[in-house]
Image (spheres, grey):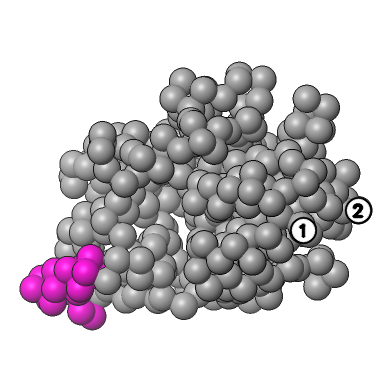
């Protein structure tokens, strides 16, 4: 079984981390895996195992047909083409349809949380392509919500729709500070992450907040900086925009908050668990679906500020042993790898 992982870039992000983790897991378990990067490397490329075959298409524009033809000839050498993110799937499918000889079995691994597009928007028409011209045959969703959408909206056959919850590889951090200070938030800078609510919390909890994440929306970042200045929070709020290994940083903090309005995973909550860092998160996404009933003290279904503060104050009552136990029971890389291999085998056999 020869597997090709497809991504446009390995910039820091949830889907990109999964590509690296999965490729490494497959490789160290003696599976034949290659990674193709369609556009540019990104910081996470250095985390790929050095023995993994890493191909670089170096595409400068989407409709460079020579590059598309080159990509199709690469795909023809693999049994399964595991494509991450919808825009990469559309490109992969077009290349295969136009130039592919073998007509590779292409999987869409959908990491998105924004599933229902308003009619007549660009996203609406892009999703229509997945139902029609670039008809999906195999769909992997990171949440039950994703899978339900894949079946009901995209029309993927139920037996070709697979749930694959996110995972992370736990990092054993050797050097840990003797004293932990303040709160941490790990979130790319974009409006869906609802970071202004986190800033409101900072005013009340009297704890400094460090926010790790890439600036995905510069206008929103400027808005947040303005809020910080207006509320005299400059000394309390710090942005770190160039961190590629967050687990090493998490051990510095007392607790974490995650205020995103909508999520599929998210990976970072699993990283909090792995490092035994208590957190309060809005109850959205597959991590909540999986462990919300056994760790209800970590989740909240409102944005009432007083309720968030009460949750934060109660975090000290949660034992680190309980977090470790829940991480190992639900998010091990061994379980993740086996689920993924089962998906590949069912795809090949179909």
- Specify which label sits upstream in the sequence, 2 or 1: 2
Q: Which quadrant is the N terminus positioned in?
A: top right
Image: magenta residue range: 219-235
Label at residue 74: 1
Pointer 2: what residue?
30
Q: Quadrant of residue 163?
A: top right
In the figure, is residue 214 to the left or right of 170? left
Q: Residues within 10 Å of mark 2 (few under 14, many from 20)?
A: few
Which residue appears at 26% of the width and 56% of the height? 191
In the figure, is residue 286 to the left or right of 28? left
**Mark 2, secondary structure of its residue:** loop
Label at residue 187: none
- As rendered, which of 158 and 204 lies closer to the eye? 158
Q: Are marks 2 and 1 in contact (CB under 8 Å)?
A: no
Q: Which quadrant is the C terminus positioned in?
A: top right
In the figure, is residue 343 to the left or right of 250? right
Q: Quadrant of residue 118?
A: top left
């Amino acid at each position: 079984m020869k597997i090709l992982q497809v991504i446009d870039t390995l910039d820091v992000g949830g889907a990109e981390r999964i590509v690296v983790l999965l490729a490494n897991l497959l490789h160290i378990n003696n599976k034949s895996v290659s990674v193709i990067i369609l556009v540019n490397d990104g910081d996470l490329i250095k985390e790929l195992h050095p023995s993994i075959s890493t191909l670089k298409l170096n595409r400068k524009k989407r409709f460079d047909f020579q590059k598309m033809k080159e990509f199709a000839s690469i795909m023809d050498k693999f049994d399964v083409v595991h494509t991450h993110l919808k825009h990469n799937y559309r490109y992969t499918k077009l290349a295969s349809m136009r130039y592919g000889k073998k007509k590779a079995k292409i999987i869409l691994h959908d990491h998105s949380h924004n599933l229902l597009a308003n009619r007549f928007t660009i996203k609406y028409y892009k999703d229509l392509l997945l139902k029609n011209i670039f008809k999906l045959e195999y769909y992997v969703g990171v949440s039950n919500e994703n899978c339900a959408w894949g079946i009901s909206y995209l029309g993927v056959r139920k037996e070709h729709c697979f749930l694959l919850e996110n995972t992370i590889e736990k990092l054993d951090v050797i050097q840990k500070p003797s004293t932990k200070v303040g709160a941490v938030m790990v979130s790319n800078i974009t409006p869906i992450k609802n970071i202004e609510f986190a800033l409101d919390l900072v005013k009340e909890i009297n704890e400094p907040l460090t926010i790790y994440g890439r600036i995905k929306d510069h206008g929103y970042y400027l808005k947040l900086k303005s809020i910080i200045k207006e509320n005299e929070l400059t000394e309390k709020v710090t942005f770190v925009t160039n961190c590629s290994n967050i687990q090493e940083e998490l051990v510095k903090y007392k607790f974490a908050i995650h205020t995103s309005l909508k999520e599929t995973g998210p990976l970072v909550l699993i990283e909090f668990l792995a490092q035994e860092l208590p957190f309060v998160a809005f109850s959205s996404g597959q991590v909540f679906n999986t462990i919300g009933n056994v760790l209800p003290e970590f989740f909240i279904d409102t944005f009432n500020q007083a309720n968030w503060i009460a949750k934060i104050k109660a975090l000290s009552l949660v034992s680190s042993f309980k977090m470790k136990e829940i991480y190992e029971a639900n998010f091990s890389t061994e379980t993740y790898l086996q689920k993924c291999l089962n998906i590949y085998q069912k795809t090949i056999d179909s």
